Amino acid sequence: MKKFGTAVILAGGKSKRMGRNKELLNINNRRLVEMQISKLERDFEEIIVITNYPQYYDGLNCKTFKDIIKNKGPIGGIYAGLVNSSSLHTYFLACDMPIVNRKYIKFLKNNLKEKKNKACITLLGDWIEPFNAFYSKNMIDDVKNYIENGGYSIHELVKNLDVLLIEEKTARKFSPTWDMFINFNTKEDVESFLKENELGI
């Protein structure tokens, strides 16, 4: 099994505050998820999208799968991604995150390469950033058991697992403004981001 061949984009969620499905979000007249795929495919052989609308991805360089355990939010998406991944360690991103930081992904891979941790996640203070992170197939049973016992929080799950944590000060060397962890929740978020950034993919 390849160690780092797979990236997963989670494309679920209600998108209530955005007012439309985030999977169809356009940035500069191009779908954000297409931009994510085009960048991720430079570093990963397999791109998986967890989605309830596989028809949105026809013609794109990705595989699509639906949630295996329904209505569990992001943690259910992580479970489905890990089950369907063909790699030991899988990179996870949400479909509303505009920045794919390839240098940071490489840094995470290098840190995880010789270790047996079940995940590699970045800290913001004492809080974790659940995406722009790697999760391992070795935690599939942990995730399933946690969900089946009523668990819903990624933060609570990883507290009890062997996780490699990257300190905030280290991550900020790659992203001083923390933009690689930004996600869009509203139209105003998108407009504000575009005013301050040129999104070059």
Image (cartoon, helix red, strand yellow):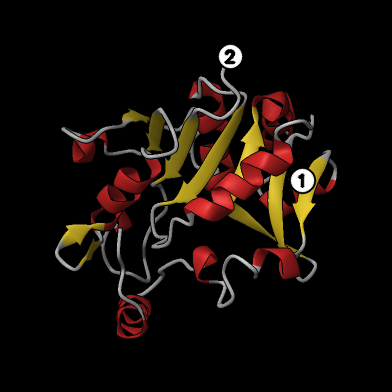
Q: Left or right of 76: which side holds 173?
A: right
Label 1 crowd bin: few (<14), some (14–19), many (20+), radius 10 Å: some
Q: Secondary structure at mark 1?
A: helix
Tell me which amino acid carries mark 1.
Answer: Val
Which residue shows up at 77% across the image and 71% down it? 125
Question: Which residue of the protein is positioned furthest toward the top in this rendering?
Answer: 1
Judging depth in this view, the residue of 106 and 181 nearest the camera is: 106
Which residue shows up at 33% across the image and 38% down it? 52
Foreground: disc 2 or disc 1: 2
Residue 128: give x, y in percent of width and height: 71, 59
Q: CA distance from mark 2 to mark 1?
A: 24 Å
Tell me which amino acid carries mark 2.
Answer: Met
**Image quarter of the C terminus:** bottom left
Query: From what the image shows, is residue 128 above or below residue 134?
Result: below
Judging depth in this view, the residue of 191 and 43 nearest the camera is: 43
Specify the label residue 158 is tagged with: 1
| First in sequence: mark 2 vs mark 1 | 2
Q: Left or right of 193: which side holds 89?
A: right
Specify the label residue 108 is tagged with: none
Specify the label residue 1 is tagged with: 2
Residue 64: give x, y in percent of width and height: 33, 30
